């Protein structure tokens, strides 16, 4: 019986992962507000009651979608860069994987977080707070990489780590909004390289 229960639990987890994968893809194109239990159930060939069993409310579905999208983002765009040695190598590799994240269409609508950030920017509440906290955490991580590079003697000490992290993040954000231009990735790669070369020792 325990094995049967374990199988049922695993099946439920797989179903939830499938729902959230589709939800994140859909939200990257149409926004989180367009996510409804009814529309997702129709897309996935499930009953509303079956999908409702995983999420008790629309906000719960939206927050779970953000968490699933963040995990996909971390695995595809962030984790590979963190394998590099701390400091300049980690900055360079992280920025390259962020460009690949956009270039490879990890989310069909471009960067999931840019999309939902624009959608909820002027709407106070749990969704906006979650997105903002994630964004602030990401910039803080970039700033730590800059400080590591400074401690390694790879980057000028007079560089403001928070400002430089903001600058690098701005390049990625700008690239996301112009992905329909075939030159965007190449130009962004050049801009990031020039930015890094400017502060290297």
Image (cartoon, rainbow, N blue to C red):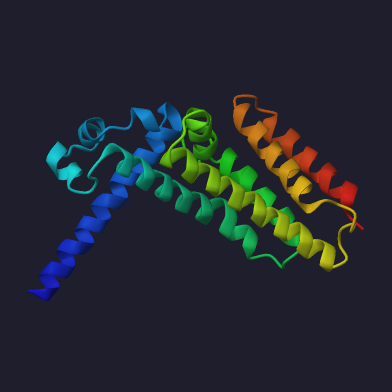
Residue 173 in view: yes
Q: State the image coordinates of residue 12 (x, y, percent, origin top left).
A: 21, 56
Instruction: Classify the position of the C terminus by image quarter.
Output: bottom right
Q: Residue at x 41, y 27 (%)?
A: 30
Residue 47 in view in this figure: no
Nearest to the observer: residue 174 or residue 122: 122
Q: Is residue 95 above or below residue 190?
A: below
Tell which of 168 and 101 is nearer to you: 168
Residue 177, percent across and down? 61, 28
Q: Is residue 158 above or below residue 19?
A: below
Residue at horizontal 17 percent and vertical 69 percent from the top: 6
* Residue shown at the point (44%, 29%) measured from the top left: 29
Measured as percent of width and height from the top left, residue 91 is found at 73, 55
**Image side of residue 44 versus residue 166, left or right:** left
124 is higher (above) or lower (below) than 71: above
Q: Residue furthest right?
A: 201
Q: Is residue 163 left or right of residue 65?
A: right
In the image, 88 versus 134, the foreground residue is 134
Q: Residue at x 37, y 29 (%)?
A: 33
Q: Position of residue 149 (x, y in %)?
A: 80, 62
């Amino acid at each position: 019986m325990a094995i049967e229960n374990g199988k049922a639990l695993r099946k439920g987890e797989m179903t939830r992962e499938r729902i959230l994968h589709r939800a994140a893809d859909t939200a990257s194109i149409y926004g989180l507000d367009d996510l409804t239990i009814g529309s997702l159930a129709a897309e996935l060939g499930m009953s509303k009651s079956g999908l409702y069993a995983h999420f008790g409310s629309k906000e719960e579905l939206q927050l779970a979608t953000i968490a699933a999208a963040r995990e996909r983002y971390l695995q595809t765009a962030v984790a590979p860069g963190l394998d590099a040695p701390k400091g300049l190598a980690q900055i360079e590799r992280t920025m390259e994987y962020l460009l690949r994240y956009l270039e490879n269409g990890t989310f069909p609508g471009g960067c999931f977080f840019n999309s939902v950030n624009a959608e909820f920017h002027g709407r106070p509440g749990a969704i906006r707070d979650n997105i903002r906290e994630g964004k602030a955490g990401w910039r803080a991580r970039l700033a730590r990489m800059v400080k590591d590079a400074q401690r390694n003697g790879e980057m000028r000490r007079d560089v403001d780590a928070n400002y430089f992290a903001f600058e690098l993040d701005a390049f990625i954000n700008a690239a996301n909004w112009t992905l329909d231009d075939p030159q965007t990735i190449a130009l962004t790669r050049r801009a990031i390289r020039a930015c890094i070369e400017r502060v290297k020792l």
